[in-house]
Amino acid sequence: MRRGGGGIRRLLYETRCPGYLFMGLLLGFWEVAALADLVDADFIPRITAIAVSCGELIRSGELPQHVARTLARTFQGYAWGILLGVAVGAASGLWRPVHALLGLTIEILRPMPVVATIPIGILFLGMGNRMNVFVVALATTWPIYVNTFQGVRRVGAELIDTGRIFGCHPPRNIFKIVLPAAMPFIVSGLRVSLAIGLIVAVISEMLVSGDGLGHFIVDTAQAFRVPEMYAGVIATAAVGYALNRTFLAVENRFMGWHKGFTAQRAA
Amino acid sequence: MKQERALGLVFLGALLGAWELVARLELVSRRYFPPMTHVILTFLQLSGSLDLPLDLGRSLGRMFGGFFLAVLLMVPLGFLMARVRPAYNLFEPLVETLRPLSAPAIIPVVMLFLGVGNAMKIFVVFYACAFPILINTVDGVRGVDPVFVHTARTYGATSQEIMRKVILPAAWPQIFGGLRTSLPIALIVVITSELIGGNDGLGFFILNNMRNFYIRESYAGLLMVGLVGYGLNRVAMVLDARFTAWDRKGRD
């Protein structure tokens, strides 16, 4: 109280307290509105009810199981995406004829929203896991391809020439020089792709799958298990957040060198 | 350059030719894989009978509806958050909390409230576009060199003039970047929302025809989606060159 206006001013200007307070108010309002039947509690269950169902679903192992299925699909597709994206991107960046050959076709296919291919993917791959993995692979390939291509293009000739002087010839220099030098670019493609991969996995599960987070959300919505549905949505967000955080942590661990390196070069 | 373009065309042609050949020889069942020429024929027929154009119109209407709603609300909010510190502190935690919540995941929730009609789809597109637009606007406006603002103020510009003639142009390239990022996202999300809940639009067109084993029609719908994606990308590139090229030139 003694600090008076100054303290409040500092709180407003220098901290995120207003934001957390705002969020708390929103959640509190939600809880009260649901409790007092101001909103249809069938659609908007109490926050506490959602939290309870989260807890139950975690304890029963149902939610973790769906998370595991979704993650498995995401990473299977992602692995294919990395393989294809890096291979085609590097080949296109290294050899002009490859780029000339594939460039136009890729340019036409790339802006195609991958989700639209799901119905036709079902025709070929059926309703099973392969379909989900295929769609994730397709979606994750593009950003990795683009970033690898640009990264490889930017590898200076002096690096490759220096390698040659020291006896590092193709194809060995691709793995020893070109790809490591392009790595910062490739990694940013990997990060974007991971987020896309998860989203696409969830979408594909909503349309065809007997498990996974996407299936869980749609299934609970249709069965009108509304608190469980919210729990599924929250879990999806949490998984996305955790994946991104983990990626950043791994990137810092293994790619820390490039920050100093790039800064040095720029200076 | 010309040679490279030709090589690209040859490859694309060979790919389409291979498709045609594989389908004609029925190496893959024709029920799954109609010849390319049949797909194009069906595409033209459906375009002529307005089936496809109508669904295209619905999808584009929803997409741009959500997109422009996001522009209308998020660009001003971005300015506010970038220029007024308490506003930033008020909204930033909420934005960061909601950001990992991806638009497709909330489709079933929104369906509870808004049904499967236009309102649901427009809202989901709006939600998906809101984050790239907001974040780029905040970053763009915050990144404006304060010297510009101080200089303008020294020369007696009012805050309104500073906003319109200094900050907006300086932040524009990044704001535009946000719009460019969110447009393809809008297309993906509108198609997704039509696949998951709906009874018209391009996403539904593809899925429904596939379910009824109108495979050629389904492919024709996919072709239309591909054309839209390609077209949007071209338009964005042209606008990019027109409106933000000066910025890159200035920085090089």
Image (cartoon, coloured by chain):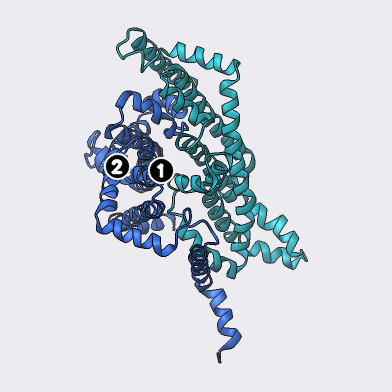
Chain colours: A blue, B cyan
Report whether A207 appears left or right of B68. left
The disc at residue A170 is none
Residue at the (52%, 45%) spot, across then down? B124
- From the viewer's perspective, tell me whether residue B134 is left or right of residue A139: right
| Residue nearest the viewer, comparing A148 with A239 | A239
Question: What's the amino acid at mark 1?
Answer: Gln
Measure how far apart labels 1 and 2 are at the Cα level: 14 Å
Chain letter belonging to callout 2: A
- Circle 1 chain: A
Which residue position is annotated with label 2?
Answer: A211
Find residue A199 and report its image quarter: top left
The image quarter containing residue A227 is: bottom left
Tell me if residue A164 can be seen: no
Q: Position of residue A207 (x, y in %)?
A: 38, 36
> Which of the 4 quarters of the picture holds residue B212?
top left
Q: Among all residues in the image, which is located at the extreme bottom?
A: A2
Residue A222 has which mark? 1
**Rendered view: A122 above or below B18:** below
Q: Position of residue A160 (x, y in %)?
A: 31, 40
Does residue B47 show up? yes
Q: Are marks 1 and 2 in contact (CB under 8 Å)?
A: no
The residue under label 2 is which amino acid type? Asp
Q: Are marks 1 and 2 on the same chain?
A: yes
Mark found first going from the N terminus, 1 or 2: 2
**Place of residue A162 in the rendered image (x, y in percent of width and height, measured from the top left):** 29, 43
Number of numbered discs on residues: 2
Q: Is residue A241 found left or right of B157 in the rendered image? A: left
Residue extending farthest to the front is: A37
Front position in the image: A256 or B56? B56
In percent of width and height, residue A98 lies at 36, 26
